[in-house]
Image (cartoon, rainbow, N blue to C red):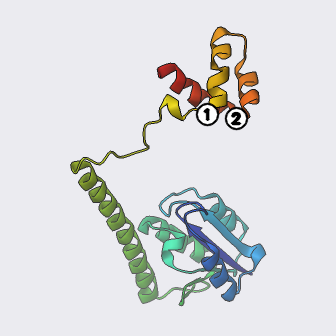
Amino acid sequence: MIYGYARCSTNETKQDIDRQIRELKAMGATEETIYHEYETGTKTNRPELSKLMGRIEEGDTIVTTEVSRITRSLKQLCDVIEFAKSKKLRMVIGNFVIDCSGDIDHMTEAMLQMMGVFSQLERNMTIDRIKSGLANAKAKGVRLGRPKRTAEEVPKKVQEFFPLYQAGTLSKTDYANLCEISRPTLYKYIALLTDG
């Protein structure tokens, strides 16, 4: 059986995982055998990867578009290689094929580990660039983080019923229902109205 694994770091509104899924299908995986998720590549406990590892059987194949989709950590990559060896799996990473049904030659294993080193290096460099950019913006006086919300941004309906809530004649549940908002959203608005 051929299983595919696709991963993006951020959610579907920010990154499109469809390209990876199309490529995995071209590599022989099917809609039913592709596992995909939006998690960071350094996270050790990824639900879909764990499901895949739990389902795969000896002699199966794992396909992925590049080593960084499996992990951005060299240690985790080494763990995946050991898992593949124990299950005698075949791994296809892009155009790179690793057959773990027998002994992996040292050059192949070293090459795979080098790919892992570069994947981890790329992630670390990205983090450094982000930190540098944030520090630079902060030095220029740019205010970082979410903008501070004010009481003026609270919807009119919430403002209208606020005196009834303050007087104790309106419960939070009824208040939220009247304003057609969730209770957590109501709590945020109450905090703004109370502070303002």
Query: Image quadrant for the N terminus?
Result: bottom right
Q: Quadrant of residue 23?
A: bottom right
Name the foreground residue: 113 vs 156.
156
Distance, label 2 to label 1, CA atoms, is 10 Å
Q: Position of residue 119 (x, y in %)?
A: 41, 73
Which residue lies under the disc numbered 1? Answer: 155
Closer to the eye: label 2 or 1: 1
Which residue lies under the disc numbered 2? Answer: 181
Looking at the rendered structure, the kind of residue marked 1 is Pro
Q: Determine contact: label 2, label 1, CB under 8 Å.
A: yes
Q: How many marks?
A: 2
Q: Position of residue 99 (x, y in %)?
A: 58, 87
Name the foreground residue: 139 vs 116.
139
Looking at the rendered structure, the kind of residue marked 2 is Ile
Name the foreground residue: 68 vs 10.
10
**Where is 112 relative to 55, above or below?**
below
**Where is 49 relative to 185, above or below?**
below
